[in-house]
Image (cartoon, rainbow, N blue to C red):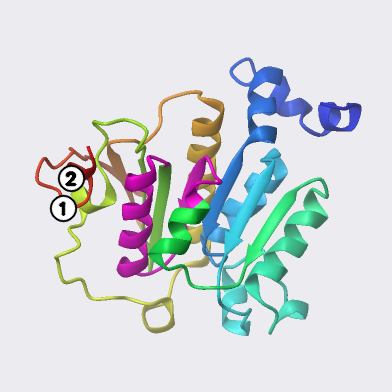
């Protein structure tokens, strides 16, 4: 690290659990963030501020006025701009040393597999089950850790699926791809603006811990938040020996 980096990341380096070694691990790390909206905004901003060396951000949408109630990476002046470009502008303003890849597209399985060969961790910040299952399946195949978050109305959830470990459950162990889930969108149900910040910030925290190999992750645990009561519920997630995704990949 150079002198500017030592100063920029000094409050990390002062932490015994991180130190110079942990910060260097972040500077060498590569992350894929799928979704640059409500959850993706805090994830991207904290990965940028923490010094994750290379970040690939994927989103095919543009900034809309209705996004600004919760998607803090974007601004009124950037309405109509591609979200990947708007988020990149915010991230580079915060940390100009970042290496960024901006992909304005929807990922198909082949594209996902190619991207996973380039990264150390994946953040699922999307808002539909089909995409979540596709990301999970790709991470299982590539044995890449996945940090998954979701938020709607006043309810949020977060978990880690650390596919580097053979005994780790996957997203499909929790939510079977064969189940019929009613898709609920923010445009119809609404979402409490700080909720996505809470869940997204926790996703960033879990991902940074994994990259630095510190603490205990949420692997094998699901945290659910009822923000109206400000109550957390924790559920254990066991690997399903008959899971159609990870049982076959083990």
Kindly report which numbered mark, 1 or 2, lies closer to the viewer in this rendering: 2
Q: Position of residue 70 (x, y in %)?
A: 57, 68
Q: Which residues are magenta?
A: 116-144
Q: Tell me what residue is drawn at x 11 percent, y 40 percent.
A: 241
Q: Is residue 194 visible?
A: yes
Name the residue furthest left: 242
| x then y, percent, for residue 170 | 27, 45
Q: Which residue is mark 2?
A: 248
Residue 153 image-quadrant placement: bottom left
Residue 124 painted magenta? yes
Do the numbered discs 1 and 2 sit on residues whose CB atoms are within 8 Å?
A: yes
- Asked whether residue 198 is in view, the answer is no
Q: Toward which corner of the image does residue 62 lie, by quadrant? A: bottom right
Q: Residue at x 40, y 32 (%)?
A: 217
- Say which mark, if any, is on residue 110: none
Residue 18, compared with residue 63, is above or below; it is above
- Does 134 sit above or below residue 215? below
Residue where numbered disc 1 is placed: 244
The quadrant the N terminus occupies is top right
Q: Is residue 1 left or right of residue 233?
A: right
User: Per the image, is 2 magenta?
Assistant: no
Looking at the image, which residue sits at the far right? Answer: 3
């Amino acid at each position: 690290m150079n002198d500017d980096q030592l100063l920029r990341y000094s409050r990390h380096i002062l932490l015994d659990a991180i130190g110079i070694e942990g910060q260097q691990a972040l500077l060498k790390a590569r992350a894929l963030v799928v979704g640059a909206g409500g959850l993706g905004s805090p994830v991207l901003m904290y990965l940028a501020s923490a010094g994750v060396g290379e970040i690939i951000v994927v989103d095919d949408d543009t900034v809309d006025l209705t996004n600004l109630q919760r998607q803090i990476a974007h601004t009124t002046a950037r309405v109509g701009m591609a979200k990947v470009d708007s988020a990149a502008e915010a991230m580079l303003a915060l940390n100009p040393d970042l290496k960024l890849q901006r992909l304005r597209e929807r990922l198909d399985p082949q594209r996902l597999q190619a991207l996973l060969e380039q990264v150390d961790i994946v953040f699922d910040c999307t808002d539909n089950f089909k995409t979540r299952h596709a990301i999970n399946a790709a991470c299982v195949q590539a044995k890449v850790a996945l940090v998954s978050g979701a938020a709607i109305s006043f309810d949020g959830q977060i978990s880690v699926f650390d596919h580097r470990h053979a005994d780790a459950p996957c997203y499909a162990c929790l939510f079977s791809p064969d189940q019929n889930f009613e898709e609920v969108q923010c445009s119809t149900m609404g979402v409490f603006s700080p909720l996505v910040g809470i869940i997204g910030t926790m996703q960033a925290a879990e991902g940074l811990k994994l990259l630095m190999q510190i603490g205990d992750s949420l692997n094998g645990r699901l945290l659910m938040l009822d923000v109206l009561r400000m109550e957390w519920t924790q559920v254990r997630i066991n690997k399903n020996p008959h899971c159609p995704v990870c049982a076959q990949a083990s």
